Amino acid sequence: MDMKSEPFEGGVKLELSGEFDIGGVPKVEGAIRRLEEERPALLILDLSGLTFIDSSGLRVILTADRRAKEQSRRFALVQGPSAVQRIFKITGIDTVLEFVAQDQAS
Amino acid sequence: MTRKHPHDIEQLAPDRLVPDRPLSLVDRRARRIALGVLGSVAGPALVTGALSPLQFEDSSRIAGLLYLIPVMVVAALGGIVWGVVTSLLSVVSLGYFFTEPRFMLEVGPGEGVQLAVLLAVSFGIVRMMGSQRREMVNAGVGQRRLAFLAGANELLQRASLDFERTMTELARLSVPGLADWCTIDVRQDDGRLRTVAVAYGDRVRAPLAENLAHQNQPNPQAQAGIAAVMRTGRAELYPVVDADIIHTVARDPQHAALLKGLELRSLIIVPLLVRGKPIGAVKFASVRPDRRYDAEDLTLAEDLALRAGTALENVRLYQQRTHEARVLQQSLLPPTLPTIDGLEVLARFEPFGHGDLVGGDFYDVFEAGGRWQFVVGDVCGKGAEAAAMTGLARHTVRAVAMREESPVEVLRALNAAILRAEQGNYCTLTLASVKVGDGVAQVQLVRGGHPAPILIRADGSAELVGGDGSLLGILAQPTLQATELTMRNGDALVLYTDGVLDEHKAEPEKDLLEALRNCTGAPAKEIADRIFEEETETMGKRDDRAVLVLRLNDVNEKGFANRWT
């Protein structure tokens, strides 16, 4: 599990790569919360580098989404590979979360 | 601790106890001194006597040089005191018998100087040799201590969950480097001490050492020994073990006799401390005259006991946690499955890991509103939090299903309940509500963000069933829809959790479908077997696995239902 944050005009993007399971939760959760302190208008979590995500990873995304809604910020995801997208589809939250194109944040 | 004359040991140790007793400490020391004295006096005397007929000008000088050799021997064998004593004796004897018969009374300045020089030289040699030997011994001891500590560290860090095995290995490790005999006693739940580990070296007679491990309980009020160490939590160091000490530390006369039989020379008893409280004790004993425990050994032993105590506590906590997890997990799963006419039901659950954490998977089977309800769910996370959510999910579904016929409404109620609980957690779940008729079953299926169930037809085909649905506990208005199915004789419905899928793949369900094709006529057990065999490398074992199979029996198979594995 690796990550890299990249600010852009009007927001910040956090790129995740590797396997996002329970082992990566504290790292990603911490990183997202640090970025949130700056109150970015748009926080993008880029999942395109992920190979796997499990329910704990999903929970981090869902709670980040909830915090953004509570604080009237915009939280969006860049789609991951099909194995990652599958989880969003099965859990029925692909329609609830906002997905943006990769180039939107560059 | 008062040191008594070593003879007391002899008096109190009846020979019949130790028929093949080697030379005692006293015997050996006396023999060594006698040899030293004899060597340093008789040797030079004989040489000088042999040389004197040759009429050397000053034969005493030759003898004086020669006598240095036995002095060195004595120094090497004994110690500084005996080196000096033998030097003096030999000088005096040489002077008296060979150089000047009335030497004792008329010491000339020449002889005085000679005597002083020889004394100084012998003193120096004795010291040098003594310190060299000590250094060699110390270096050896230091190395052994280091090796022992390293080994013990490794052993205790391996986090062996079998405490007694760890303790036995630890005891073995201390022999012979640190002790010739090592025992570890631990207080049991009933308050009694039990020897959990014994190790001894070649120098200790095995029957005695083994016997000692099975002794009576010590008097808890004893002033010294293991009971005192356990009571006070303070270590005891006996650099020299004598009869008094044996009498004090022994549990009873028989124990004392055994201890004497072992010929202990030096003893350390350290408490095994867990959060400052003694829960056991480790005994290190030496039977070697050249190994007397000192403060450094005591520090090492205490350090070791502290680590061992921590290891024990970890094992205990782990066992307790595993036990609690098991109890909790069992309370979250139905203890048995109900018998359902015409339906073969099988549940298989395999928790992830070593069973020390409550997993997030669960299943349930119960009757409500004249229909059988089958539930398979997955709660995010592990441990107490997951257990709480599992309890909430399982009991909410059960309670709501009693008054609510629509499975969609049951899941909506659960969604609301999880949101109200405000745990920030969620759950995915499949609910199959089944009405069993004669050779046919009507199924209403709802998927709350859970992987799609598989329907295996009697003709061998298999398909994913159930409509889309969102996970529960996140959205105020989850999307949920019921799918109606009709099962006929030989059809099987498989509910499962994602632990049986390789979620590194884009469509892992396809592999599962493939594995379940041509299951025609297979009983529920075989279906479950096939699913559990589908384990790929990338899946590893990172998740719980739960499978619930319900199969509508062929008419002629009726009565062969309700397997439980």
Image (tube, coloured by chain):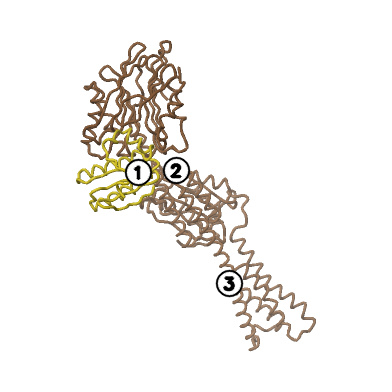
Chain colours: A yellow, B brown
Kind of element beneath mark 1: strand
Inspect this view and state whether residue B174 appears.
Answer: yes
Residue B321 placed where, x, y %?
36, 40
List x then y, in percent, for residue B390: 30, 33
Of all chains, the one bearing label 3 is: B
Q: CA distance from mark 3 to mark 2?
A: 51 Å
- Residue A47's disc number: 1
Disc 1 marks which amino acid?
A: Leu
Q: Position of residue B204 (x, y in %)?
A: 57, 51
- Chain ID at mark 1: A
Residue B161 circle label:
2
Mark 3 highlights which residue? B80
Q: Nearer the viewer, residue B227 or B233?
A: B233
**Towards the viewer: B542 or A91:** A91
As measured in the structure, the alpha-carbon distance from the residue carrying label 1 to the one carrying label 3 is 79 Å
Check the picture and name the quadrant holding the N terminus of chain B: bottom left
